[in-house]
Image (cartoon, rainbow, N blue to C red):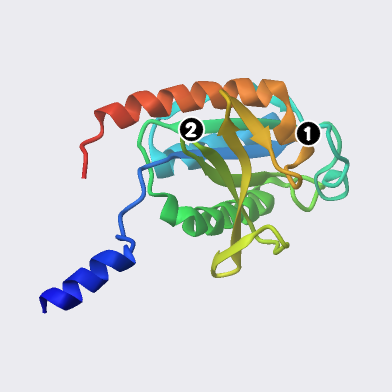
Amino acid sequence: MEEWLQQVRELRVGEISRPKSALALIAAFSRHEAALEWAEQKLTSRWGAAALKSAAFRFDATDYYEASMGPGLRKQFWVFEQLADPGALADWKLAANQWEKEFAEIAGHDEPRPLNIDPGYLTLGKLVLASTKDHAHRIYLRDGIYAETTLYYKDKQWQAREWTFADYRREDYHAFFDQCREFLKQRLRKEPRA
């Protein structure tokens, strides 16, 4: 038995551990201010009070969404007081998709998709987003949901990947994500160690 234990130690088998809690970071965009307000109500009903809320940024880095969402889009971000398990990202995206359908049905707007809700999470080292679309850089989670590391934090600043969406390269977004990261640092100091 001792010989076997010694062999296991030499193999340096990795120990499974739970990830640190993350900040649920949710983006919503629309051309309708009421849609962003509605999204915020849904988000706070799920995660509780928002710890930080961004300004509503102009979303004009691409016209990809114009056909389904109309012109003049604005994007807003929220992070929440309650830290979250990053392993629940697929659940968040599934809920977001359902909320988008719900809003489209009740809002009565001409656009087929008057509201887009994109969940993700922020850790001290990265910003991860969920997607329903597969691509070479995306990892399948479950139930048709994928994840990608959109930004990573290095040399005291947010860094883009070659696939990072154009708007996530913006300095004003990064300034907000810096605030989120500082908030997370403070929250993690208060969280009990496992």
Q: Is residue 31 visible?
A: no
Q: Is residue 63 visible?
A: yes
For residue 19, side relative to residue 153 (left or right): left
- The residue that mark 1 highlights is 73
Q: Earlier in the sequence, mark 1 or mark 2?
A: 1
Q: Residues within 10 Å of mark 2 (few under 14, many from 20)?
A: many
Q: Return the x and y of residue 121 as percentages of the image width and height.
A: 51, 42
Amino acid type for the residue under numbered disc 2:
Val
Residue 137 image-quadrant placement: bottom right
Residue 145 image-quadrant placement: bottom right
Q: Return the x and y of residue 135 as percentages of the image width and height.
A: 73, 62
Amino acid type for the residue under numbered disc 1:
Leu
Q: Which of 59/86 is in front? A: 86
Residue 27 image-quadrant placement: top right
Q: Return the x and y of residue 60 as percentages of the image width and height.
A: 83, 32
Q: Which of 108/126 is in front? A: 126
SS state under label 2: strand
**Number of the label disc, if any, that sits on residue 99:** none
Residue mark closest to the camera, 1 vs 2: 2
Q: Quadrant of the C terminus?
A: top left
